[in-house]
Image (cartoon, grey):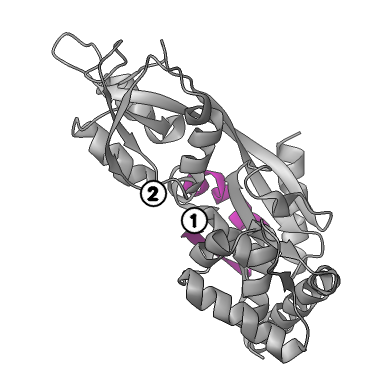
Amino acid sequence: MELKLLEDYLALVDFGSFSKAANARSVTQPAFGRRIRSLENWLGFELVDRQKYPTTLTPAGKDFTAQARELTEQFYNIRAEMREQISSTKRITFVAQHHLAVSFLPHWIKPLQSLTDDTRIRINADNLHDCLDTLMSDQGDFLLCYHSPDIFPQLEQSNVLSLQVGTDQLIPVSTVNETGMAVHQPYPNKPLKLLNYPDESFFGRLLQRSYFSHNKPEIQFQLQCENALVEGLKALTLAGNGLAWLPASGITQELEQGVLIRCEDMLPSIELKVMLYRKQKPRVKEVEVIWNYLKNVNK
């Protein structure tokens, strides 16, 4: 049996859907289904009740879930321990959502370096799903991301510690015309050119949940372009292609210079919490040192 089959099964459990889990694992749905069937064949019992919809686990599947998580975690723990033994340099790894790795971490992480003189700090930027995988498989020590308990409930587990380390805001913005007014803003009975995040991305799901799922009918949107990266959507916005919701932390200078303007008369802003997560049992003692320091700083 391959480890990836266990990870496939846990993705299915977490997402509750073959299509969503297949997308998260970057395989086609038919291929994903064959991998789940391969795991069942190896185990000798069915994990999924294919006579029910939506996706439902069999009683054996429910019992196996906790064991699958434990087996996967043990494997990565062993790998981390062996890597630590053969490495001459201690290392602490922060994984962060792309935007926070650019806008938040560079200034925030500087005082941490003096706490771990003989330890190297590594920063990995990725989408939130892959960041979560890295943390839960013990390949990363800290996860920096926006608060999203309803999108990724795995971060609310008892073996995961959390700490709020900042705030942010997702705000609708547009470029301005020669009179300083927004080029793209809502008008009755006129489509508003929209630059948006893909539905499956973190900000895409956040906007869908917080606004688009109950959008005011008088505002019509005409989707111009999608980009999962904040910096990509920002560039499209600055080029005048449409209105976009962007994190305030990434456009401070543009707002101060008047290059971008808030469009909040008819469109909402979304408050964001910046959270730091870690596993309850640290991989190295320096993790606890950093955590205690940040707890005191953020009281």
Q: Residue at x 43, y 48 (%)?
A: 102
**Closer-to-camera residue (287/231):** 231
Badge 2 element: loop
What residue is shown with label 1?
127
Q: Where is residue 128? Give x, y as percent.
A: 54, 54
Left or right of residue 209, residue 246 in this image: left
Q: Quadrant of the C terminus?
A: top right
- Report which quarter residue 115 is drawn in: bottom right
Q: Quadrant of the N terminus?
A: bottom right
**Closer-to-camera residue (19/76):** 19
Q: Where is residue 43? Give x, y as percent.
A: 76, 87
29 lies above or below 151: below
Residue interval drawn in magenta? 104-125
- Report which quarter residue 280 is drawn in: bottom right
Dot 2 alpha-carbon crowd within 10 angstroms: few under 14, some 14 to 19, many 20 or more:
some
Left or right of residue 225, residue 65 in this image: right
Badge 1 element: loop
**Label 2 near label 1: C-beta < 8 Å?**
yes
Left or right of residue 257, residue 81 in this image: right
- Report which quarter residue 158 is drawn in: bottom right
Mark 1 to mark 2: distance in Å? 9 Å
Q: Amino acid at mark 1?
A: Asn
Residue 227, disc: none
Q: Is residue 120 magenta?
A: yes
Which numbered disc, 1 or 2, marks the residue that appears first in the sequence?
1
299 lies above or below 255: below
165 lies above or below 68: above
Residue 228, disc: 2
